[in-house]
Amino acid sequence: MTKYKIEVCLETVESVIRAEKGGADRVEFCSDLFEGGLTPTLGAFKIAKRICKIPMNVMIRPRGGDFCYSDVEFEVMKENAHIFKEEGANALVFGILTPKGEIDEERTAILKEIASPLPITFHRAIDMTRNAKESIEILKKLKVERVLTSGLESSVMEGILTLKKMIEWAGDDLIVMPGCGINERNFGFIKQELKAQEYHIFLQEEENSKMEYRPTDIYMGGLLRQAEFSIPRTSISRVKNIRSY
């Protein structure tokens, strides 16, 4: 059986603990997965680092929305890159695009230099670029270690043909890590088709809140919101199921 690695995407210390118990190889630590993942708090990262031994790659993303950042937002990214490198992150995760939908080579190179010698993952910002092959060639030129992608589609299953080509184009110079929409039902097929070295997976379950008093007419978020009394956590059993393939 070909050896492969499982990276679990998550946003809480509790989920880091669960991913480790489930047998994940590492985690991508974020906050606000509702926005696709933002930079986690330093406090949460430090507690997770104190409790767990699993490698933690840290998201460097200052806001939700697109990946074309202002000068001030880029300064925030650089500062967070310095901080999480110094605090013991195993890798940094980010993605920056130009207004024309191409990888921002200059800013990517700057963040890569700050991260060094840590490896970096260029995240799914690549899926918002115009041309998959050109994007892969740019990342290879910049000596980026890894790219997270769904093949420029909404999910790995939809982008599987492009992903096959991206893995071929990357060769031994860049790890192409499929991610988005991978679960227990399709992982066997995806693994067989792509034969990738690594997979990025979001495996969640809902945990009932311990609150007994539950007012139903007050909300802590906006109009588009998740349930107040249902807490999302990484599922240990689901990670173990994926790990068993």
Image (tube, rainbow, N blue to C red):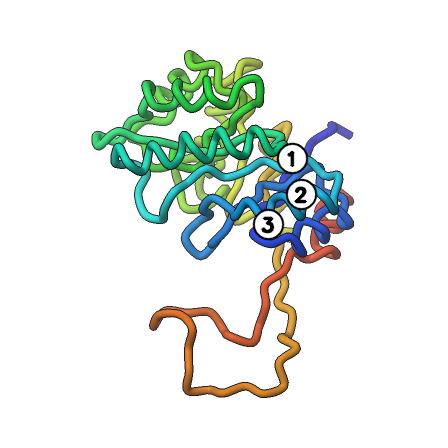
Number of other residues with Cα within 10 Å of mark 2, as a class: few under 14, some 14 to 19, many 20 or more:
few
Secondary-structure class at tag 2: helix
Q: Nearer the viewer, residue 26 or 5?
A: 26
Q: Element type at marker 1?
A: helix
Tell which residue pokes out farthest to the left in this image: 100
Earlier sequence position, callout 3 versus callout 1: 3
Q: Which residue is mark 2?
A: 188
In this rendering, is residue 144 above or below 44? Answer: above
Q: Is residue 161 visible?
A: no
33 to 136, vertically: above or below: below
Q: CA distance from mark 2 to mark 3?
A: 33 Å
Q: Amino acid at mark 1?
A: Gln
Q: Earlier in the sequence, mark 2 or mark 3?
A: 3
Between 185 and 200, the residue placed more toward the observer is 200
Determine the residue positioned at 70% across, 49% down: 19
**Marker count (numbered):** 3
Q: Is residue 141 left or right of residue 229?
A: left
Label 3 to label 1: alpha-carbon separation = 36 Å
Is label 3 or label 1 in front?
A: 3
Q: Residue at x 74, y 28 (%)?
A: 3
Choose top left, top right, bottom left or bottom right for residue 194: top right
Q: Do the numbered discs 1 and 2 sit on residues whose CB atoms are within 8 Å? A: yes
From the top left corner, tell me how far across and down residue 152 is, in percent. Answer: 39, 36
The percent position of residue 196, horizontal first and vertical second, equals 61, 29
In the image, taking residue 34 as reference, residue 12 lies left or right, namely right
Q: Which mark is residue 192?
A: 1
Give the residue displayed 50% in from the left and 18% down from the top: 170
